[in-house]
């Protein structure tokens, strides 16, 4: 097993040297020692680091600034902060950013090593769980969970057809319609066993080199890899590269993406089995975005030739009962609730709800309902849907966009609660980058504050 690399940043020479010696001997880790934040930042940029131990008060770059940079460079890094007793509030703020633990001075060196080992073990377990979930997910037909309605059968037929061609595919569908699962199904239909399926995070453009998370999600980057092409294209060589919510890419990156798609297309000076197949997704009308000037027209023309539209859940209510049974069966093992079923009234309530968040929202509602249920039956009261009948939204929003924002805030809150507030784990569950999660939290706070101000006035 590879030795972990620990970066230790502290401006107190004696403490730094003693702690480095104890960590190296007792935890069998390699230790990189830095006297200040500036030196530590350079080390982060030039070395793979599994864990960072940093003082909050250092000359040059502060510990808090170093933490921000570390989470940007390596979102999965384990972090422990060293703080004086009077800085506990700051340490708590650091924990909210994604720091795993904090220790007050004076230090007990053995305690630091114990906490470090515990944090590394937790990170390893979390990574293994993500990989295991990915492996399990990939053994199941990705569209088997979408239902059996006529529209879903049509999508399955289209997927089979798309598996026979190599052109880029544009998947259009609302939030939570499982566009990524459909992209996986197209990848499988190509008959390329063992070829990679790589998901690029469109919300993380341009900053630094492409990085990879445990679930295979990569940040889009203009920085070239070894072949001179973007690293995410290199990772997907011979397979499929999926871009979710393509409209989040800035125009400059869209133009670079277009060039790379042309260069990487299967059959472009390559054998049919080579190259990279590109699939993109969006919840928006790209033609309208072109008209607004926020989406590149040539890239749109390249993508819109082959389209697949995913209907929202509210337009195929006949699928809800089948899909709900599948979801509850999947959750039953995790929640130790085998045999849990929906009551007839609960099934009817689900069928009459508008589902602004589609399958993503249905999963969240059912998971919460199963946790609230006293026995094996999930009833209407456990669902938390609006009372009074009719196809009303869960959160009382009057339009679909507002309802989606309300659901997104609720879903992120539920996920954060389920992982004990750990933002790194929450980002993995939500299948987004850590920086994306921070931006969403900030944006949702702003929406909430505006609504509160409106009520106050």
Image: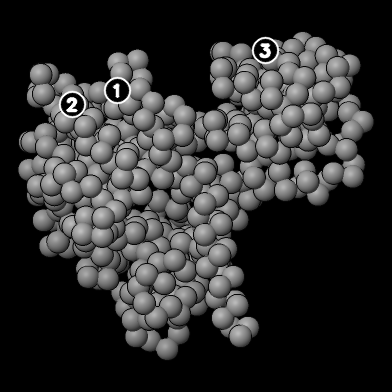
Q: Where does label 2 land, which residue? A: 263
Quadrant that contains the C terminus: bottom right
The residue sitting at the right extreme is 106
Q: Is residue 28 above or below residue 157?
A: above
Give the percent coordinates (x, y) of residue 120.
Answer: 65, 28
Frontmost of labels 3 and 1 is 1
The answer to the question of whether label 2 and label 3 lie on touching residues, with beta carbons closer than 8 A, is no
**Element class at badge 1:** loop
Give the left or right position of residue 320, taking residue 307 as reference. right
Label 2 secondary element: helix
How many discs appear?
3
Q: Which residue is mark 3?
A: 30
**Viewer can see residue 285:** no
SS at mark 3 in the image:
strand
- The N terminus lies in which quarter of the figure? top right
Ranked by sequence position, the earlier of labels 1 and 2 is 1
Number of the label disc, if any, that sits on residue 229: 1
Q: CA distance from mark 2 to mark 3?
A: 41 Å
Disc nearer the start of the sequence (3/1): 3
Q: Are marks 1 and 2 in contact (CB under 8 Å)?
A: yes
């Amino acid at each position: 097993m590879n030795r972990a690399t620990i970066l230790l940043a502290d401006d107190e020479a004696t403490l730094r040297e003693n702690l480095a010696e104890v960590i190296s001997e007792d935890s069998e880790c390699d230790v990189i020692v830095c006297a200040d934040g500036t030196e530590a930042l350079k080390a982060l940029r030039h070395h793979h680091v599994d864990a960072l131990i940093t003082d909050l008060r250092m000359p040059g770059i502060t510990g808090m600034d170093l933490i921000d940079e570390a989470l940007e460079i390596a979102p999965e890094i384990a972090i422990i902060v060293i703080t004086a007793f009077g800085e506990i509030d700051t340490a708590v703020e650091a924990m909210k950013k994604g720091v795993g633990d904090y220790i007050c001075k004076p230090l007990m060196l053995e305690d630091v090593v114990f906490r470090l080992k515990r944090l590394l073990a937790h990170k390893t377990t979390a990574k293994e769980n993500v990989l295991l979930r990915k492996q399990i997910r990939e053994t199941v037909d990705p569209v088997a969970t979408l239902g059996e309605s006529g529209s879903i059968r049509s999508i399955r037929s289209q997927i089979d057809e798309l598996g026979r061609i190599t052109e880029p595919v544009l998947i259009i569908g609302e939030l939570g319609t499982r566009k990524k699962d459909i992209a996986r199904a197209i990848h499988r239909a190509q008959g390329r066993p063992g070829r990679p399926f790589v998901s690029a995070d469109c919300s993380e453009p341009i900053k630094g080199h492409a990085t990879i998370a445990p679930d295979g999600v990569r940040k889009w980057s203009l920085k070239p890899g070894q072949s001179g092409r973007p690293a995410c294209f290199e990772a997907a060589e011979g397979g499929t590269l999926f871009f979710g919510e393509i409209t989040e890419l800035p125009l400059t990156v869209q133009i670079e993406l277009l060039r790379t798609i042309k260069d990487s297309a299967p059959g472009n000076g390559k054998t049919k089995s080579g190259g990279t197949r590109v699939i993109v997704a969006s919840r928006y009308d790209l033609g309208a975005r072109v008209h607004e000037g926020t989406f590149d027209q040539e890239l749109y023309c390249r993508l819109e030739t082959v389209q697949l539209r995913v209907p929202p859940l509210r337009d195929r209510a006949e699928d809800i009962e089948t899909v709900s049974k599948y979801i509850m069966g999947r959750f039953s093992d995790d929640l130790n609730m085998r045999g849990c079923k929906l009551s007839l009234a609960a099934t009817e309530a689900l069928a009459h709800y508008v589902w602004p968040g589609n399958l993503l929202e249905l999963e969240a509602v059912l998971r919460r309902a199963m946790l609230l249920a006293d026995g094996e039956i999930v009833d209407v009261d456990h669902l938390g849907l609006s009372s009074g009948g009719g196809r009303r939204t869960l959160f009382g929003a009057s339009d679909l966009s507002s309802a989606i924002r309300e659901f997104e805030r609720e879903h992120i809150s539920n996920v954060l609660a389920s992982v004990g507030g750990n933002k790194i784990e929450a980002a993995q569950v939500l299948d987004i980058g850590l920086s994306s999660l921070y931006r969403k939290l900030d944006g949702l706070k702003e929406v909430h504050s505006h609504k509160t101000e409106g009520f106050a006035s």
